[in-house]
Image (cartoon, rainbow, N blue to C red):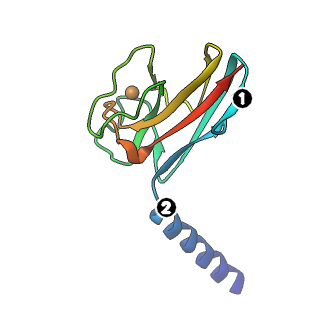
Amino acid sequence: MLKKLLLFVSFTTFFSMTQAAKQKIYFVTPKNNETVSKIFKVKFAQSGLVVKPAGEDVDNKKAGHYHIIVDGAFTPEGMVIPADEKNIHYGKAQLEAEFTLSPGKHTLTLQFADGAHRSNGEKLSQTITVNVK
Ligand SMILES: [Cu+2]
């Protein structure tokens, strides 16, 4: 009985914590200012958000997919993120990618946007600098 009660309490605590989780996205790797090889892996993660393929659940403000902007800033909130060589969409709900960049310093901006590619703005973005060997 006590065991069941404890299980119930921990489950509801976990559930309310999940509900209250602040929305956040971040690079798992590389770290800011990390030195990387010419070809390197990028991984990203989130809390309080659901990653879904582009075109799905487009009006859900808690769902969307990732973008990486190379050597550019975040996309202002509500603006549709362009698709070109500097603005890469991960519309299949990917959580990692491989990059090939020229030697030197580059910035990578991770940007979350909804299923219609409308940006969540600066609050759901993160910019890091990498030093490519
Ligand atoms: Cu997109």
Q: Which mark is residue 70?
A: none
* Residue that label 2 marks: 21
Mark 1 residue type: Thr
How many numbered discs? 2
Image coordinates of residue 87 in percent, x first then y, are 42, 22
Image coordinates of residue 50 in percent, x first then y, are 46, 45
* Beta carbon at label 2 within 8 Å of ligand 1: no
Query: Observer-nearest residue: 93 or 5?
Result: 93
Image coordinates of residue 21 in percent, x first then y, are 49, 61
Query: Observer-nearest residue: 56 or 27?
Result: 27
Q: Residue at x 61, y 19 (%)?
A: 99
- What is the crowding at mark 2: few (fewer than 14 residues within 10 Å), some, or many (at least 20)? few
Residue 72 location, quadrant:
top left
* Residue that label 1 marks: 35
Say whether disc 2 or disc 1 marks the residue closer to the N-terminus: 2
Residue 3 location, quadrant:
bottom right
Q: Quadrant of the C terminus?
A: top right
Name the front one of labels 2 and 1.
Answer: 1
Q: Residue at x 62, y 74 (%)?
A: 10
Ligand 1's image quarter is top left
Q: Residue at x 69, y 16 (%)?
A: 38
- What is the crowding at mark 1: few (fewer than 14 residues within 10 Å), some, or many (at least 20)? some
* On screen, residue 28 above or below 37: below
* Residue lying farthest to the bottom in this orientation: 2
Q: Is residue 86 left or right of residue 34?
A: left
* On screen, residue 47 above or below 18: above
Q: Residue at x 53, y 29 (%)?
A: 108
Query: Observer-nearest residue: 108 or 55?
Result: 108
Q: Quadrant of the N terminus?
A: bottom right
Mark 2 residue type: Ala
Query: Observer-nearest residue: 131 or 100?
Result: 131
Secondary structure at badge 1 equals strand
